[in-house]
Image (spheres, rainbow, N blue to C red):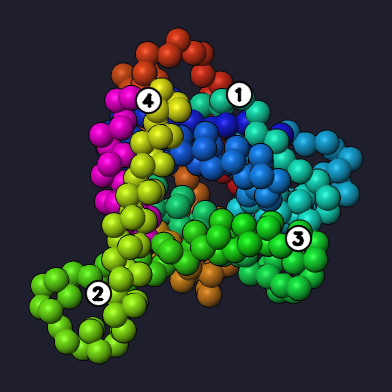
Amino acid sequence: MQAKLNYFNSTQNLLTRWFTVEYSMWFDLLLPSLASSDAPIPLGGTSNHFRVTQLRELGAWDPHNVTEDADLGIRLYKTGGYTAVIESTTYEEANSQWYNWVRQRSRWVKGYVQTYLVHMRHPFSLWRATGTPAFISLQFILGGTCLVLLVNPFLWALMVLWFATKWNVIEAMFPSSIYFLGGAALYLGNFTFAYLNVFGCLRRRKYGLIKYSILSPIYWAVMSLAAWKGFLQLFYAPSYWEKTQHGLTKAAATSVDGGLSTTPNIAGESTR
C-alpha cells in the first residue's frame, strides 16, 4: 500500500512551491493512474505498508540501491504482487534550499538509473515476468524519466542556437521530419506536462500554486543539473547516499495551501 505524499511547507519559498506542484502531480495523478492500469509502481519511501511475509520473500530492500523503495516496487510486481495507492496523505518537509535539493534529487535520479539497469540486465526475462504493457510502462517511467532529464540540456542548447544564429549545420544534421517532431515535443509536450502540473494542483486543491506550475520548465532545468550530477556519480560512487538536511522549515510556512483544515502526519525521508 502506497500512501500519497505532499508537503506541509509548500508556501515557504519558490522551490517548495515547485516541489509541491511536482508531488501533487506524481502522487495524485500519475501513481493512481499506474495502479488503476495494473502497471508497476516505483514506490515512494515514506508511508509504504507491506505484508511482512511477502517482504521477506522478496529479500526486503536492496542495500546497494539508493532508491531502494523504487526497486522494491518493481521486484514486487515481477513476482506477482501489486501496489494500491490509498487515499491518505503523509505530509513531510519539502527541501527549501537549492543545494540541498540538488543533492537529494541527484540521488533519486541515480537510484532510478540503477533500478532501470538492474532490471534491464535480462530484458527478455523482464518482459516475460511483467508482460508487454508493464514492460513498456517501465521503459517510460524509469528509463524515459531519466533519459529526458539528461538529454534536455542538449536539446535546449540546440534550440537556442538555432533561433539565435539560424546555423545551417543544425539544419544539415537533422531532416525536416525531425524538425517537426521536435517542434511538436517543444510545444505540445511541454504544454501537456505543464497542464498535468496544473491539474495536480487542482486535484490537491492547492489553487495558489497554479501560477507557479506554469513556470515548471525552469524547475525542470534544475532537475537536469541534478540528474547529470547523479548520473556521473554512478561511475565513481554508485552506492553513495547523499545526505539530505531536514529541519529547514520556517514556522510561519507550515500552513497547507487551499485552506484545508487537515492535521498533517509529518514524516521525513530516511537519513541512513
User: What is the distance, in whole Å, between disc 3 and disc 2 at their CAs?
Assistant: 37 Å
Label 1 Cα crowd, 10 Å radius (few <14 / some 14-19 / many 20+) = few
Q: Are marks 3 and 2 in contact (CB under 8 Å)?
A: no
Give the residue number, with chain letter if any, for mark 4. Answer: 206
Amino acid carrying label 4: it is Lys
Residue pointed to by mark 2: 158
Q: Is residue 222 magenta?
A: yes
The overriding secondary structure of the stretch rendered in magenta is helix
Q: Earlier in the sequence, mark 3 or mark 2?
A: 3
Residue 152 belongs to the span the image colors magenta? no
Specify the quadrant of the image occupied by residue 86: top right
- Which of the two residues, 29 or 101, is positioned nearer the viewer here? 29
Q: Which residues are magenta?
A: 206-225
Q: Secondary structure under badge 1?
A: strand
**Eye-nearest disc, 3 or 4:** 3
Q: Between disc 1 and disc 3, whose residue precedes?
A: 1
Give me the disc on residue 131. 3
Q: Amino acid at mark 2?
A: Leu
Q: Quadrant of the N terminus?
A: top right
Answer whether residue 170 is visible to the viewer in this image: yes
Q: Residue furthest left?
A: 165
Task: Report the residue at 38% width, 49% height from top.
Answer: 192
Closest to the camera, between mark 1 and mark 3, is 3
Q: Which mark is residue 156?
A: none
Dot 4 or dot 2, earlier in sequence: 2
Q: Amino acid at mark 3?
A: Gly
- Report the number of numbered marks: 4
Q: Mark 1, mark 2: which one is toward the viewer? A: 2
The residue lying toward the viewer, choosing from 166 and 94, is 166
**Camera-nearest label, 3 or 2:** 3
Q: Which image quarter: residue 20? A: top left
